[in-house]
Amino acid sequence: MHTPAYAQWQKMFESLVYIYEFTSNANYIFCATGPKGVFRSSNNGLTWDSSNTGLLGRKIRAITAKGNYIFAGTDSGLFRSSNNGNTWSSIHQNIYYTFVFHLECNEQYVFAGTLKGLFRSTNYGATWDSINTGLPYQYGRVVIDALTVFNDTLYAGVQIDPPQKKVYKSTNNGNYWDLIEYNNFDSVLVYSLQAKDNSVLCGTHKGVFISKDAGWTWRKLNEINPNIGLFGFSILDNDNIVISSFGYGVQVTTNGGVNWTFRNEGLLPDEYFPCALYSSGIYTYMGTNPFSYMPAIFRRVTQQLIPVLENNVTIPDVAELYQNYPNPFNSETKISFSIPSSEGYGFSRGVGLARLTVFDISGREIETLVNKQLSPGTYSVIWNAADFPSGVYFCRLQSGSSVSVKKTVLIK
């Protein structure tokens, strides 16, 4: 069955490169690659241009943006641009090591992970201080495998021989580090980390682990297939998360990791090999490294991946399911609904369970689009019906004691 172009991943750029990482500022999306350096896009990924003037090395493993500055970690040291990547200059004078593998930033600092540990800058990279107190030294150095920061809390994967543990946390911008006490981290190889709000994702050679309480407790995401460790993470909020895994493509959750759905529409099976994932604005970007095709950058509207988005803060008086649009439709339609704050609809403290389902003409439930606690407001969800035959369907919203049904027609 054919899925419309607007409802799938779209290939924006391809080149014989390895795509390491994305970042963005107010003007551009940036992509770090090897061996062709930095590419940038000023039109949300439609076109990409080389941005390498002043870079001595073209293998860019890490890139991040802070204010007007862009930072790139290369095989020839750390570089910075103050003009959207038009030109670059070296700033790694006192980091003491050529290779910079990880870059992160928050409101106060820029952080760099190297083969000799972690460094922090308070002045946009002009000078750097070591922040390795509490991290394990081995063979005279601290090797950082992964790094993420949210507000003033950092998480780091450290390369050490087993049976020592590997994931560390700092709640004071790296002034001191504490070991995360979790037995499954004893001998893992940590490849990727991301934190936002209270959610933390840790990608390892044993699979992906998630914490919903800022790293205190963890569980393995068994629905995310273990692989060689190439996981991309995009945490939109505590409920809505996108994960890419090498060989399996993209999976999403709208309930904090309890249930997962594959979203590989528009990709060929040999393109299920992402090596980078990033959400910015209305789009999510993915870099792939397939075996039969050129490496490529794909783009997709994030709402197609995580379809439930609040689009109106006006609090309605009653729960209501609106007619989907378009109707009739071919493969994809938008369904909007309102959630009230009234206790009479089964809500407690202004938050209640909303369940939006689809039934076929025989009354059989065929898909659940929403089943989660929602704050009062108006929401929309995209129903992709590419896998269902033409016919009459019924959308049903239940919120508290209120039930509303609308008929829709799928025509292919």
Image: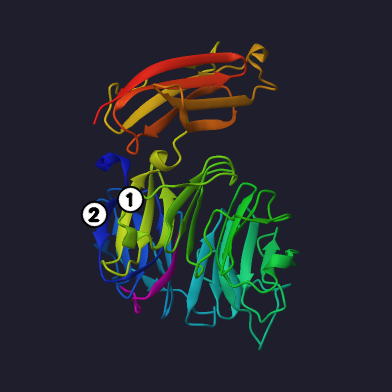
Which callout, 2 or 1, points at the residue further toward the start of the chain? 2
Image quadrant where one finds the C terminus? top left
Give the Cα distance between marks 2 and 1: 11 Å
Q: Quadrant of residue 156?
A: bottom right
Q: Quadrant of residue 63?
A: bottom left
Q: Which residues are magenta?
A: 54-64
Depicted 309 relative to depicted 192: above or below: above
Q: In the image, is 7 to the left or to the right of 119?
A: left
Residue 247 percent location from the top left of the image: 42, 63
**In this figure, which residue is indicated by the disc labeled 1?**
299
Residue 125 in view in this figure: no
Q: In the image, is 380 to the left or to the right of 9?
A: right
Residue 321 percent location from the top left of the image: 46, 17
Image quadrant where one finds the N terminus? top left
Depicted 305 relative to depicted 98: above or below: above
Q: In the image, is 37 to the left or to the right of 229?
A: left
Where disc 1 sits, the SS reads strand
- Crowding at label 1, few (<14), some or many (≥20) Cα neighbours within 10 Å? many
Q: Amino acid at mark 1?
A: Arg
Residue 38 percent location from the top left of the image: 33, 67
- Tell which of 3 and 149 is nearer to you: 3
Q: Is residue 344 magenta?
A: no
**In this figure, which residue is indicated by the disc labeled 2?**
47
- Crowding at label 2, few (<14), some or many (≥20) Cα neighbours within 10 Å? few
Residue 330 percent location from the top left of the image: 26, 30
Q: Amino acid at mark 2?
A: Thr
Residue 94 in view in this figure: yes
- Tell which of 366 and 129 is nearer to you: 366
Q: In the image, is 263 to the left or to the right of 315?
A: left
